[in-house]
Amino acid sequence: MMTKRISLAYSPDTDDAFMIIALKDQLIDLQGYSFDFYRDDIQNLNECARSEMYDVTAISIAAFPGLAQNYLMLPVGSSIGDGYGPIVVAKKDRIQSLHELRNAVVAVPGLQTSAYFSSLHLLPPFHAKPMHFEKIIPAVLSDDVEAGILIHERQISFGDLDLNKIGDLGQLWMQKYGLPLPLGGNAIHRRLGDEHIQNITSLLKQSIAYAFEHRDVILKQAVRESHKEDVLPDDASARRYIDMYVNEDSMSFRPEVRKAIGLMYDRAAAAGLCPAIDMNGSIVSTPSHPN
């Protein structure tokens, strides 16, 4: 096989690190490929994908319709909320229930994120204030906003702070549609061509499989690499988080997940939020066997 150099970008959360460590540390056979790795906030990665910066990049699944002309969605490496997902929090003395969010100022982790998109379908109308995901809790606590939507590890660990969890977008989505909530995924540039796309898809799948087989070691490394020791302070919390977002849905799209993604895009297109896309021509077919 001809050697090929690939740029790969991932988000700074533990589940992304967990899934690519075997690839990054060459713990699997890279079969002649060479990777340059980049890490950035998911909203920034969504924006970078619009300028076609990386060959392979983590994205919000909700952002993909605007990228489909240049990228294909990979069926591996996704994070799906199966009855759980980003949470809505507010100070305990300020907002007690979801209906109180009407016309409130709510911090969101970017206007292209799946968390924000799903909130438009699930919450009362509100005024979104986009900001970096790590600034949302301080903004809520300082009364800069009335509520905030938390993603990544903060969904399960916001400590002993003076916050109420007033809603779970994954739970609300499941109640409304009876489907899991698509959150994060990976996209690969069409310019690579079919052979490289299939090979890289297989390598990513092997990287996740390796992480499953060496879970304890890879998990500790993923927490360190993502600098999340403060929010995942022990093995139990780290395992809980990884079990939520790195599982069978990260290895391939179940029919229910494909249906949920299609529903998300159909609703968005009907509302004029994104272009309509053909899902069949936008998802890489999963290799039947690793190379």
Image (tube, rainbow, N blue to C red):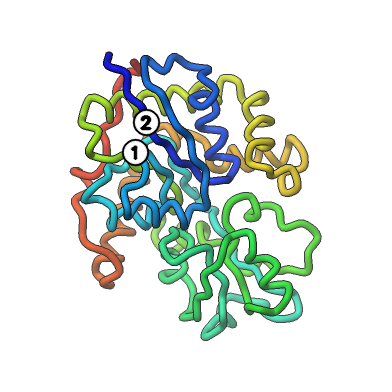
Position of the N terminus, as image quadrant, is: top left
In the visual, does 56 lie left or right of 164? left
In the rendered image, residue 245, in percent from the top left (x then y), is placed at 53, 42
Q: Is residue 50 left or right of residue 78?
A: left
Left/right placement of residue 141 relative to residue 66 reads right
Instruction: Measuring from the top left, give residue 243's x and y in whole percent.
Output: 59, 38
- Label 1 vs 2, first from the N-terminus: 2
Dividing the picture into quarters, in which one does residue 236 lie? Answer: top right
> What amino acid type is highlighted by mark number 2?
Ile
What residue sits 39% from the left and 57% below the top? 47
Q: Is residue 282 above or below residue 103?
A: above
Q: Are marks 1 and 2 in contact (CB under 8 Å)?
A: yes
Give the numbered dot on residue 55: 1
**Secondary element at tag 1:** loop
Which residue corresponds to the image point at 40% horizontal and 42% vertical from the top-left?
Answer: 57
Q: Which residue is mark 2?
A: 6
**193 is higher (above) or lower (below) than 141:** above
